[in-house]
Amino acid sequence: MSEPLLEFDRLRVDFDLPNGTVTAVKDVSFTLHQGETLALVGESGSGKSITSTAAMGLLPELARASGTIRWHGGSGDENLITVNRKRLRAIRGNEISMIFQEPMTSLNPMHRVGRQIREVLHKHTPRATMPTCG
């Protein structure tokens, strides 16, 4: 089997609320190898989206992640929970991407889809190789 590409080890995500701390994700562990497909399945509110957004560094400000999310791609072995914001921005979109499940919160209905996709490509693709789309 190939080397691990992405490893979650005892991921925990807590939300610090005015009434106290709420644990949204507790002890999530799995390993994903290159070429594998993984499906996170569970009831609404079970932590699927929070688990994914933790890997992308997109948790809300009041969320606190602990454990390890180890990324073995790109330039090496990095813990996505502790990596600095600049490096995380470089990884996100270039090495790891996420397709959000709700188009109404992911896409702006005031702009054509092609324009929104072009914007992402513009931010993450060198100019010389950037495709044109209408």
Image (cartoon, helix red, strand yellow):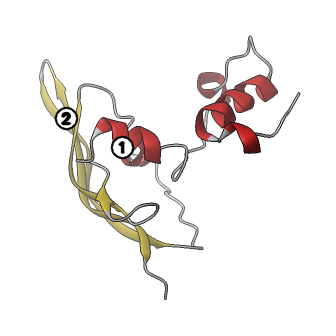
> Is disc 2 placed on a helix, strand or loop?
strand
Disc 2 crowd rating (10 Å Cα; few below 14, some 14-19, many 20+) is few
Name the spot of residue 40 as percent of width and height, x first: 49, 57
Name the spot of residue 126 as percent of width and height, x first: 65, 41
Rendered position, 86 above or below 7 = above
Disc 1 crowd rating (10 Å Cα; few below 14, some 14-19, many 20+) is few
Q: Residue at x 67, y 27 (%)?
A: 119
Comes first in the chain, label 2 or label 1: 2
Q: Amino acid at mark 1?
A: Arg
In the shown orientation, is residue 41 left or right of residue 10?
A: right
In the shown orientation, is residue 106 left or right of residue 117?
A: left
According to the picture, the residue beneath numbered tag 2 turns out to be 22
> Is disc 1 placed on a helix, strand or loop?
helix
Rendered position, 19 above or below 95 = above
Question: Could one spot residue 124 in this view of the protein?
Answer: yes
User: Distance between the Cα atoms at labels 2 and 1?
Assistant: 29 Å
Q: Residue at x 54, y 43 (%)?
A: 93
Tag of residue 87: 1
In the shown orientation, is residue 22 left or right of residue 39?
A: left
Name the spot of residue 79 as percent of width and height, x first: 28, 56
Residue extending farthest left? 20
Q: Amino acid at mark 2?
A: Val
Residue extending farthest bottom? 1
In the shown orientation, is residue 75 left or right of residue 109?
A: left
Hey, which quadrant is residue 115 in on the image?
A: top right
